[in-house]
């Protein structure tokens, strides 16, 4: 797990796809889970866990609560 891997990160709130693409190249999709509650799903290959930590720190700075992080290993992102 120290090398490149694909991760899926779910956060509460709306992530601007342009912002995250500039930060780490992850793809973003959005879903409305209940009235007024948007969830964003970020999927992409990160260089290592240091890069994952950088993404999580950036989400924290944007005040976007992380719901889950999933290590997808070598699976292709959708």
Image: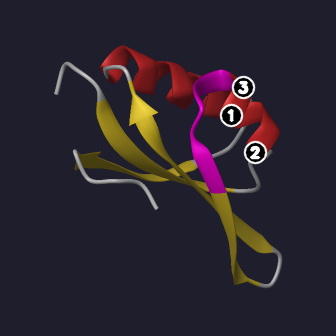
Q: Is residue 25 found inside the magenta-colored segment of the image?
A: yes
The circle on residue 17 is 2
Contact, mark 1 vs mark 3 (Cβ under 8 Å): yes
**Mark 2 Cα within 10 Å, few/some/many (few <14, many 20+)?**
some
Q: Secondary structure at mark 2?
A: helix
The quadrant in which residue 60 appears is top right
Contact, mark 2 vs mark 3 (Cβ under 8 Å): no
Q: Position of residue 18 (x, y in %)?
A: 80, 38
30 is higher (above) or lower (below) than 7: below
The CA span between labels 2 and 3 is 9 Å
Q: In this picture, which residue range is highlighted in magenta?
A: 23-28
Q: Secondary structure at mark 1?
A: helix
Residue that badge 3 annotates: 22
Contact, mark 2 vs mark 1 (Cβ under 8 Å): yes
19 is higher (above) or lower (below) than 48: below
In the image: residue 2, left or right of residue 42:
left
The circle on residue 21 is 1
In the image: residue 37, left or right of residue 11:
right
Identified at 75% across, 45% down, the residue is: 17
């Amino acid at each position: 797990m120290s090398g490149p891997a694909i991760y899926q990160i779910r956060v509460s709130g709306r992530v601007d796809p342009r912002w995250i693409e500039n930060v780490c190249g992850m793809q973003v999709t959005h879903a409305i889970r209940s009235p007024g509650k948007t969830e964003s799903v970020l999927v992409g290959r990160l260089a290592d866990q240091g890069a994952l930590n950088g993404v999580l720190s950036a989400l924290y700075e944007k005040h976007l609560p992380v719901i889950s992080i999933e290590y997808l290993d070598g699976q292709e992102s959708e």
